[in-house]
Image: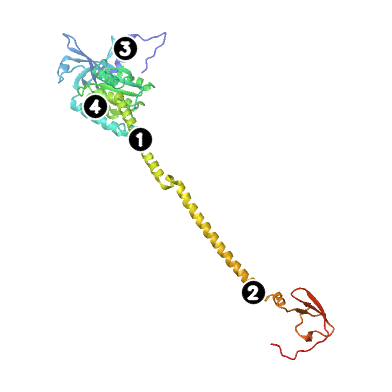
Amino acid sequence: MAMQSSADQPIPVRQVSEAVGGWIAKLGMIWVEGQLAQINKRPGSQMVYLVLRDPSADVSMQVTTFRRVFDTVVPPLAEGARVVVYGKPDFYVPRSTFSIRAEEIRQVGLGELLARLEMLKAKLGAEGLFAPQRKKPLPFLPRCVGLITGRASAAERDVLENAKRRWPGVQFRVENTDVQGSKAVPQILPALARLDADPEVDVIIIARGGGSVEDLLPFSDEALIRAVADCATPVVSAIGHEPDSPILDLVADFRASTPTDAAKRVVPDVAEEMDRVAELRRNAWRSVARILEREAMGLGAFRQRPVLASPYSMIDGRRNDLDELTRRARATVGHRLDRAADDLGHTLARVRALSPMATLERGYSIVLGPTGHAVRAVEEVAEGDVLDVRLASGRLTATVAEVTPSTTPTT
């Protein structure tokens, strides 16, 4: 029930604290999992005071337990251990503080941790977070490299020194965080968000040296894995050594075996690139030289062809052919003209032979009667008719004085 209060009738502090304590007391016994961030054993006290922190968030709570409960845990508890606590939520009214009074503490063993990691890996894999098509390619030459690692750690030194040795002009944005323990994930998540939001950062490296499975647990945390999967910037995982394989290796866009390997993968080696450029230039010159040599040989072969070596020989040959054809054409035309002239002469001779003029030139004449037609028989004229006599040269007019019929038959 809500407590009724007003400015005129405020509720005393003790009543508020007692009410909160009553509400919390109704929760009953619960199991809570977390990581031990602090252990305080006070001399002469039968109570042990613990601080239990959430591995994925900056949230912690106080846990109190009897020394006999604490000492029965095997192996002995130490700061950083992952534990499961069975207890009752408790609210201490005089100080208004919340805690859990633990009646049983179980340390999460390595086998159970590995089993949980396998279950988480299967769950995330089923969601497609490890699919190759989600992987983003690394830039060839990043403008700026984001680095998340422990402060003054060997991993930070390996990445920076090897990267600058390979490419002296490379720029870094370094975010120093805890890389193990309960504070690691709560510090890495905001650092990752800052680097991913920076437009100048082209690639992000998360680096840490080797360690035990418990030391590397933050890099298998579900919240961190999902944050890396959601990054728009390519992420390189460089956790531990070659045998170490946190889940971060599976979701990252590239998995480097060591921090040194990450530096080699992220930035190119300027000496190697210069050698590669020089080799490409030599190959290009050789290719150009081969092309020029091949073209020069082809041009020489073209020049040695008869049509180019002696171009006028073809013209001379064609001139001789033209002269021969002209001579043959003239001879043919001449022969045809001669034959035509002979034929014309023969035809002219035949025409002349058949012409009446030839007959007249031999002394004959043509006699035309009064009607103008040739007289072939005496019966065609009568005495007194005027006849027109045509000779080879000139003509005569004659009058018929006598008509004498022919007594000899004509042939």
Q: Are dots 1 and 3 in contact, CB under 8 Å?
A: no
Q: Earlier in the sequence, mark 2 or mark 1?
A: 1
Secondary structure under tag 1 reads helix
Residue bearing the label numbered 4: 257
Gap in Å between the C-alphas at discs 3 and 4?
54 Å
Looking at the image, is mark 4 or mark 2 earlier in the sequence? Answer: 4
Tell me residue 134's x, y (percent): 33, 32
Is residue 56 visible in the rendered structure shown here? no
Mark in the foreground, 1 or 4: 1
Q: Amino acid at mark 3?
A: Ser
- Which kind of residue does numbered mark 2 sit on? Arg
> Could you say which disc has been placed on residue 289 in the image?
1
Q: Is residue 43 above or below residue 86?
A: above
The Cα atoms of the two marked residues, 2 and 3, are separated by 162 Å
Q: Secondary structure at mark 4?
A: loop
Q: Helix or strand or loop: what does disc 2 sit on?
A: helix
Query: Quick one: quadrant of the N terminus?
Result: top left
| Front position in the image: 337 or 102 | 337
Q: Any mark on residue 350, and which?
A: 2
Is residue 205 among the parts visible in the rendering?
yes
Q: Earlier in the sequence, mark 1 or mark 4?
A: 4
The amino acid marked with disc number 4 is Ser
**x%, y% of residue 356?**
71, 76
Residue corresponding to mark 3? 17
Relative vertical location of residue 222 with respect to residue 98 in this rendering, above or below: below
Which amino acid type corresponds to the residue marked 1 in the rendered image? Ala
**Dot 1 surroundings within 10 Å: few (below 14), some, or many (20 or more)?**
few
Please identify the quarter of the rendering in which residue 372 is found. Answer: bottom right
Q: Residue at x 28, y 25 (%)?
A: 264
- Which quarter of the picture shows residue 184? top left
